[in-house]
Image: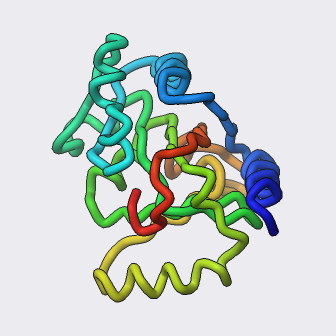
């Protein structure tokens, strides 16, 4: 499957499970989109592609209140959490995040909204294609955490009624932004 088809398949699958795909033309437009979504403090952990993008400085320059560093105290009160993505599975619209660092886990699970920054070059067909990457993660750090995120949080445990946002974000926004990082081992 070529890159265009992978992206289309991923977008269709992610939207089918409730994610919203945003395709900014560049970093300025990406910052503007995040600004529109930030209705309160933003949990922003450190991650390489976000640092290269100048995300913290750009968002602070727009007047957004950022929660950085130790997010234990503030992530639950954040309106929005932002993370990068290691890679994504086109077949299911799933994001894969190496979330061993606690700030990544907190930013992707506690705020009501999660914005995930994804370079389209990191979209792979399916879990079978992910096997070599998963082996590399395990070889580098045998006891790491990998989070698989497919759409906003949902559960049907409560009287078998589907409920959104019980165990995590109610809204998931995926910003497809070229040039972030094409290394699936880097967020």
Q: x%, y% of residue 75?
A: 31, 38
Q: x%, y% of residue 27?
A: 48, 29
Furthest-left residue in view? 70
Q: Nearer the viewer, residue 180 or 55?
A: 180
> Is residue 161 something that shows in the picture?
no
**62 horizontally vs 165: left or right:** left
Instruction: Please determine whether, in this image, residue 131 is positioned above or below residue 6.
Output: below
Q: How is the image coloured?
A: rainbow
Q: Nearer the viewer, residue 155 or 46?
A: 46
Quadrant housing the N terminus: bottom right
Residue drawn at point x = 80 percent, y = 51 percent: 8
Instruction: Please determine whether, in this image, residue 168 is positioned above or below residue 143.
Output: above
Residue drawn at point x = 64 percent, y = 57 percent: 150
Instruction: Please determine whether, in this image, residue 149 is positioned above or below residue 175.
Output: below
Instruction: Please determine whether, in this image, residue 94 is positioned above or below residue 162.
Output: below
Q: Nearer the viewer, residue 13 or 7?
A: 7
- In this rendering, the count of numbered labels is 0
Residue 124, image quadrant: bottom right
Residue drawn at point x = 41 percent, y = 38 percent: 81
Residue drawn at point x = 51 percent, y = 39 percent: 115
> Is residue 141 something that shows in the picture?
yes
Q: x%, y% of residue 174?
A: 60, 42
Quadrant housing the C terminus: bottom left
**37 horizontally vs 136: left or right:** right
Q: x%, y% of residue 44?
A: 32, 37
**53 horizontally vs 175: left or right:** left
């Amino acid at each position: 499957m070529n890159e265009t088809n992978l992206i289309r398949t991923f977008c269709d699958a992610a939207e089918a499970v409730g994610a919203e795909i945003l395709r900014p033309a560049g970093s300025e437009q990406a910052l503007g989109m995040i600004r529109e979504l930030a209705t309160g403090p933003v949990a922003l952990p450190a991650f390489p592609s976000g640092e290269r993008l100048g995300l913290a400085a750009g968002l602070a320059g727009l007047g957004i209140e950022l929660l950085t560093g130790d997010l234990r105290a503030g992530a639950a009160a954040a309106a929005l959490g932002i993370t990068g993505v290691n890679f994504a599975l086109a077949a299911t619209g799933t994001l894969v995040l190496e979330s061993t660092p606690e700030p990544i886990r907190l930013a992707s699970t506690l705020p009501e909204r999660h914005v995930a920054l994804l370079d389209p070059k990191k979209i792979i067909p399916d879990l079978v294609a992910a096997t070599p990457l998963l082996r590399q993660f395990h070889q580098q750090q045998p006891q790491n955490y990998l989070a698989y995120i497919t759409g906003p949080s949902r559960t049907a445990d409560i009287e078998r009624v589907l409920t959104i946002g019980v165990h995590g974000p109610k809204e998931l926004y995926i910003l497809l932004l070229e040039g972030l990082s094409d290394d699936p081992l880097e967020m």
